[in-house]
Image: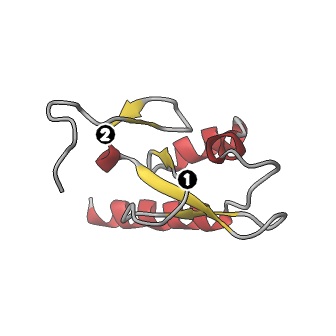
């Protein structure tokens, strides 16, 4: 895939810590489900359809995003979102990182 703007560095903002990073350093997330039952899902391949938001793949940034109520704003949807699946994904990823170190 070629970049439409050569020389332009792609950056995304983490919804937790608000720091800018390249897309490969951040985990993309999407929302799935119907009204009243919206769930935040990790999209590590960055291929799922729909509006995406980005987060550093750490529990610290996740907790900041939850505390700041950043998920509904980032996805432009009303009300709270279920993020248990994302929390489990990040915890599993943290456990794998600890084992490899």
Q: Which mark is residue 18?
A: none
Count of numbered tags = 2
Residue at the spot 73% in from the left edge and 61% down from the top edge = 82
Position of residue 14 relative to residue 51, above or below, is: above
Residue at the spot 49% in from the left edge and 46% down from the top edge = 55
* Horizontal side, residue 74 vs residue 55: left or right: right
Q: Is label 1 in a helix, a strand or a loop?
A: loop
- Provide residue 28's location: percent of width, then percent of height: 45, 54
Query: What colouring method underlies this structural image?
Result: secondary structure
> Within 10 Å of the Cα at label 2, are there few (<14), some (14-19), or many (20+) other Cα atoms?
few
Position of residue 93 relative to residue 6, above or below, is: below
Location of residue 83 (image quadrant): bottom right
- Provide residue 6's location: percent of width, then percent of height: 15, 35
Q: Nearer the viewer, mark 2 or mark 1?
A: 1
Residue that carries the numbered disc 2 in the rendered image: 22
Q: Is label 2 in a helix, a strand or a loop?
A: loop
Position of residue 18 relative to residue 59, above or below, is: above
- Provide residue 68's location: percent of width, then percent of height: 70, 35
Residue at the spot 44% in from the left edge and 29% down from the top edge = 19
Question: Where's the N terminus, which quadrant?
Answer: bottom left
The residue lying toward the viewer, choosing from 79 and 99, is 79
Question: Where's the C terminus, which quadrant?
Answer: bottom left
The residue lying toward the viewer, choosing from 94 and 82, is 82
Is there a contact, CB below 8 Å, between mark 2 and mark 1?
Answer: no
> Which residue is farthest front?
4
Q: CA distance from mark 2 to mark 1?
A: 18 Å
The residue lying toward the viewer, choosing from 20 and 61, is 20
- Provide residue 91's location: percent of width, then percent of height: 52, 62
Residue that carries the numbered disc 1 in the rendered image: 51
Residue at the spot 55% in from the left edge and 53% down from the top edge = 51
> Within 10 Å of the Cα at label 1, are there few (<14), some (14-19), or many (20+) other Cα atoms?
few
Q: Earlier in the sequence, mark 2 or mark 1?
A: 2
């Amino acid at each position: 895939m070629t970049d439409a703007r050569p020389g332009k560095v792609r950056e995304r903002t983490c919804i937790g810590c608000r720091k800018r990073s390249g897309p490969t350093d951040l985990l993309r997330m999407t929302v799935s489900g119907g009204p009243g039952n919206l769930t935040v899902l990790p999209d590590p391949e960055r291929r799922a359809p729909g509006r995406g938001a980005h987060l550093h793949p750490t529990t610290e940034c996740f907790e900041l995003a939850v505390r700041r109520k950043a998920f509904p704003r980032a996805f432009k949807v009303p009300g709270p979102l279920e993020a248990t699946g994302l929390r489990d994904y990040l915890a599993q990823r943290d456990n794998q990182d600890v084992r490899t170190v």
